[in-house]
Image (cartoon, grey):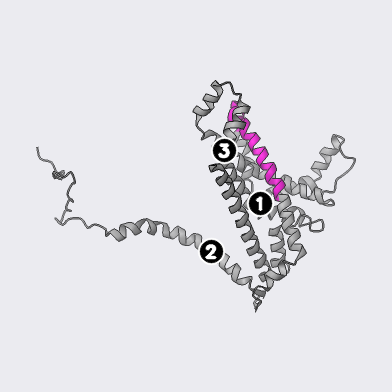
Amino acid sequence: MRTDAPSVPAGGVASATPDRSGNPPRRRSPALRKAFPYLLLAPAMIYLLAITLYPGLFAIYQSLFVVKFLNWTWTGLGNYSQILQDREFWAALGNTALIGGISLTLQTAIALTLAYFAYRDPLIRGWRIIFLMPMLFMPSAVAFIWKLAFNDGRVISDLLMSVGLVDGNVDWLASVWLARMTLIVADVWQWTPFLFIIFVAALQGQDQEIEEAARLDGASWPEIFWNISLPMMRPVIVVAVTLRGIDITTMFTNVFVMTQGTPGGATETMSYFIYRQGFRMFNFGYASAASVLMLILTIIIAQTVVKRAFHSGKK
């Protein structure tokens, strides 16, 4: 019986099958084979560098000048020297750390609690998609909703009055801590689902045999979660909280829509400070210097947290 399959020599390696013209197929050179994966990735890398590296380098370059529209005056490190003596800069940095720290702590605690129940309870497990809905809204829409609830629509004040907790309408922007609380509530409501879905995925990805062994030893589910699941989730928690913390440092939409930095700059975050310097005072070089300093500080903190967390985990 005749067959067109190529014969295999004694060494076990099939010879190259010639094409219809009778010539053997051309093989790529070793250099081209090594470069081929990089050529496939090149368009995506060029795009990412264009939208990330170039703006960053341009901001660093611009921070060395006093920029007033088309008038660029060289100042070297003058903007950095001035900004380190600016009380408003340090106040904005403190507000970012305070508001972001409280918000991140609440988000982590609530997300872990929801993940604890959603992972075990069949009823809640079937409705997990509901917990993700706040994250699907546009940040500007969320800010307007909470602004309406706290300030313009007096929804929260009416609810508090209906249960007898307050006697009249509450001016949420008149108090420093009440104004900060409005930003924290809005941020927690929208971004807790981000941590929740990561924590649930981490629980589902754990080895079920370890949990079953602990259950056979008589451990309850709270004990299993606290002593086994939570330590195993530590790398995931660190990475998720770090990513969420980096994102919190760029909190702008809620501040811009809800408080505008009031009262007295108590809710002005770093992002809003940079926006105000650049697009209200038109001091673009000063705003770029603040952006560069914030970027450096964020990288240092994030790198330190992740490095210490994973280093301690190896011990």
Determine if the magenta segment contains residue 184: no
Mark 3 and mark 1 in contact? Answer it, CB < 8 Å. no
Question: Residue 35 at what x, y percent from top left?
Answer: 35, 59
Residue type at numbered disc 1:
Ile
Q: Secondary structure at mark 1?
A: helix
- Residue at 62% from the left image edge and 48% from the top image edge: 244
Q: Marks 3 and 1: which is nearer the front?
A: 3
In three-dimensional space, the C-alpha distance between marks 3 and 1, rounded to whole angstroms, equals 22 Å
Between discs 1 and 2, the one toward the N terminus: 2
In the picture of the structure, the residue carrying the numbered disc 1 is: 248
Q: Position of residue 259 (x, y in %)?
A: 77, 54
Dominant secondary structure of the magenta stretch?
helix
Q: Residue furthest front?
A: 315
Residue 68 seen in the current view: no
Query: Which quarter of the picture shows residue 108?
Result: top right
Instruction: Find numbered disc 2 in the image and state the secondary structure of the residue it sits on.
Output: helix
Of the image marks 2 and 3, the number of the one nearer the N terminus: 2
Residue to which mark 2 is pinned: 53
Q: Nearer the viewer, residue 151 or 37?
A: 37
Residue reaching furthest left?
Answer: 1
| Dot 3 amino acid type | Met
Which tag is nearer the camera, tag 2 or tag 3?
3
Instruction: Determine the image quadrant of residue 87.
Output: bottom right
Residue 11 visible, this angle: yes
Label 3, on which residue? Answer: 233
Number of marks in picture: 3
Q: Which residue sits at x=55%, y=34%?
A: 203
Magenta range is: 100-127
| Quadrant of image for the C terminus | top right
Seen as rendered, the residue at the extreme right is 167
Q: CA distance from mark 2 to mark 3?
A: 33 Å
Q: Earlier in the sequence, mark 3 or mark 1?
A: 3
